[in-house]
Amino acid sequence: MDHETFLAIHRYGAGISVVAGLLALLAVVVGGPIAFLGPPLAFMAPLGILYFVGGVLEASGRHRIVGEELLRGIVWYGGSLLAWAVILSETPALPTTPWTFPGLPIVTTAGLVGLLVGIRSWTGLDLQAQTPGGSLLHLVGGSVLGGFLVLYAILAQGRSILLLVLYAGSLVVGWHLWRNHWGSAEDQSSS
C-alpha cells in the first residue's frame, strides 16, 4: 500500500470517527430511540479520532506534534478507561452515567493530550522514551498513575482530602527536581 492510499484511508476514518462522536453525543443528549447508539459510539469514537486524526496530522508534517500526541492518546485513553472504571465501580460519590463513563476518560485523555502538546511546544523536547525528553515523559506518566491512585484513595476508601494537597505538593517538587537535574542536562545536550 502506498503512502497516498494509506493517508486516504486515514482521512476517511477520521471523518467517520468524528461523525460517530457527534452521533454518540446526540444519542446521549436526545435519548429516545437512538439512545442505544450512545454507549458503543461513545466508547469507539474517541479511539477512531485519536488514531485516524492523529495519523493524518502526523503525516501532514505541519501538525506533527499534535498528531503524535493524539496517537499516544490511545494509550492514555485505555489507561483512563481502566482507572475510571475502577474508581466509579468502587465509589458511590460518582454515579456511573453516560456522562461520567466514558465522559471522564474522554476528558482525562483530552487533558493529557493537551498537556503533552503544551509541554512539547514549550520545552522543544521530543518526549520519546529513548530521547533526552524521556525522563519528563516518565514523570508525566508516573504523575498520572499517582493521580488516579490518590483519587481512588479519597473517593473509594474515604481518605482525607489532605492527601490531594500533599500529592499536588509532590508534583511541584518532582517538576522542580526534573527541571534542576535532568532539564538542565537536556538543555545542555541539545545545544
Image (cartoon, rainbow, N blue to C red):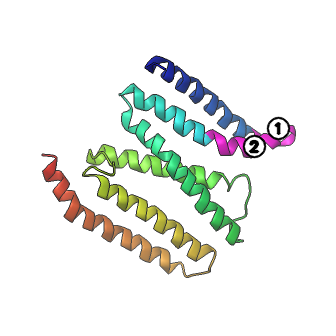
**Category of crowding for the residue at label 1, using alpha-carbon neighbours closer than 10 angstroms: few (below 14), some (14–19), many (at least 20):** few
Reading the image, the residue beneath label 2 is: 38
Residue 176, x across and y down, in percent: 27, 66
The residue stretch that appears in magenta: 27-45
Q: Secondary structure at mark 2?
A: helix
Reading the image, the residue beneath label 1 is: 34
Left/right placement of residue 137 relative to residue 146 reads left
Query: Does residue 36 lie above or below 101 as drawn?
Result: above
Q: Quadrant of residue 67?
A: top left
Q: Quadrant of residue 142?
A: bottom left
Residue 95, x across and y down, in percent: 73, 64
Left/right placement of residue 150 relative to residue 118 reads right
**Category of crowding for the residue at label 2, using alpha-carbon neighbours closer than 10 angstroms: few (below 14), some (14–19), many (at least 20):** many
Residue type, numbered disc 1? Ile
Q: Nearer the viewer, residue 3 or 134?
A: 3
Q: Name the residue rendered at 62%, 80% in the picture.
A: 158
Of all residues, the one furthest to the front in this rendering is 1
Dominant secondary structure (helix, strand or loop) of the stretch shown in magenta: helix
